[in-house]
Image: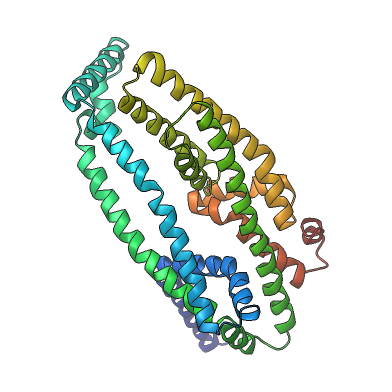
Amino acid sequence: MTSKEISFGIVKAVGILLATGIALFFLYKISTVILYCLLAIVISLLFHPLVLFLKRRLKFKNTFAAITALLLAFLLISGFILLFVPLLLAQGKNLSLVDVTALESNYHILLQNISLFLDTHNINTKQLIESSKLSSFATFEFIPNFINSLLNTLGSFSIGFASVLFITFFILKERDAIYVKFEKLLPENQKEKIVNSVKEINRLLSRYFLGLLLQLGIVMLLYLILFLIFGIENALIIALLCAVFNIVPYVGPIIASIVACLLVMTSGIGAGADFANETLPTTLYIFIGMTLVQVIDNNISSPLIFSKSTNSHPLEIFLVILISGLLFGITGMIIAVPFYTSLKVIGKEFFPDNTIIKAFTKNL
């Protein structure tokens, strides 16, 4: 090999690495757009059967069928949001009854007692607060920061919501055309395998998202029964809200329990109930009940539903979600099962004779 060939190889390798780095940086910068597209694909999978029904049974044109499906999606989401208006008004009324001055005073007394207790055990409270960045919680300075964060989140959500609906409309409207163009771009020697993989992934993911809706329905029903037993105000709305948090495996239920307990306590304040003898015990019972619901959901209903819908073993589903959460956080936990299912389908189609892939895809 000549020096010229070696130099050319080095330049080529550097060029490939540079191009790869630029491509990855570009994908990182547009990660939000990619997320919008993925959400739009998920929504299109859920509403595609409705579009087919409108086209085949009611003879709707393609565009009108897509608009009707999206309009229904918009109405469902709007109805879902409007359900929480009475809850927010009720909680606002309850919070208006709180004596903020007394609350702040009690809060500072509690902090002083905790600080005194820690100091007597040779723990430097001041240093601990500064190192853990909890100084804003020593006062109520975190409240305006929280409100600003909430407003920014709502603004981002509005933009994302409009973007996802717009992308979903064109996916539903031009699904067949997109599929045809996609097929034309495929290499002839791999076209059949890729097409089969896409069809199978589409089928399994549709089943998975329907299974997810079933799981959320079961959790909501169990929460509703729990809240009705203890006579919680707005039981149906709170149960629905807590069920939605279950979209995030393992972490979502914890957030749901905290939210439910806070709502129960504020409801108790609004009803004038004794905090120590009524509100606090009820909140504790609600927390225990929600924990039992999660034990049932995490160990029985969710593994069975998702294993049936994706043709995977319940232990597979549990480990995949757990590993994805450790590696990629909450986002990884949400997309773990769909991504893993897609990988299994692709592996079976392209490497059917591989021993490991055979073991994991025998039920597909």
Quarter of the figure with residue 127: top left
Q: Position of residue 168 (x, y in %)?
A: 48, 73
Q: Quadrant of the N terminus?
A: bottom right
Q: Residue furthest front?
A: 58
Left/right placement of residue 96 relative to residue 159 reads left
**Is residue 36 shown above or below 270?**
below
Q: Is residue 192 visible?
A: yes
Give the image's coloring scheme.
rainbow
Q: Residue sitting at 58 percent across and 40 percent down?
A: 221
Quarter of the figure with residue 143: top left
Q: Position of residue 44 (x, y in %)?
A: 55, 70
Q: Position of residue 198 (x, y in %)?
A: 67, 74
**Is residue 110 shown above or below 32?**
above
Q: Nearer the viewer, residue 191 or 124?
A: 191
**Is residue 180 shown above or below 140?**
below
**Is residue 344 shown above or below 262?**
below
Q: Quadrant of the C terminus?
A: bottom right
Q: Residue sitting at 25 percent across and 13 percent down?
A: 116
Q: Residue sitting at 69 percent across and 78 percent down?
A: 194
Q: Is residue 27 visible?
A: no
Q: Nearer the viewer, residue 190 or 214?
A: 214
Q: Residue furthest left?
A: 101
Q: Position of residue 328 (x, y in %)?
A: 51, 52
Left/right placement of residue 67 relative to residue 188 reads left
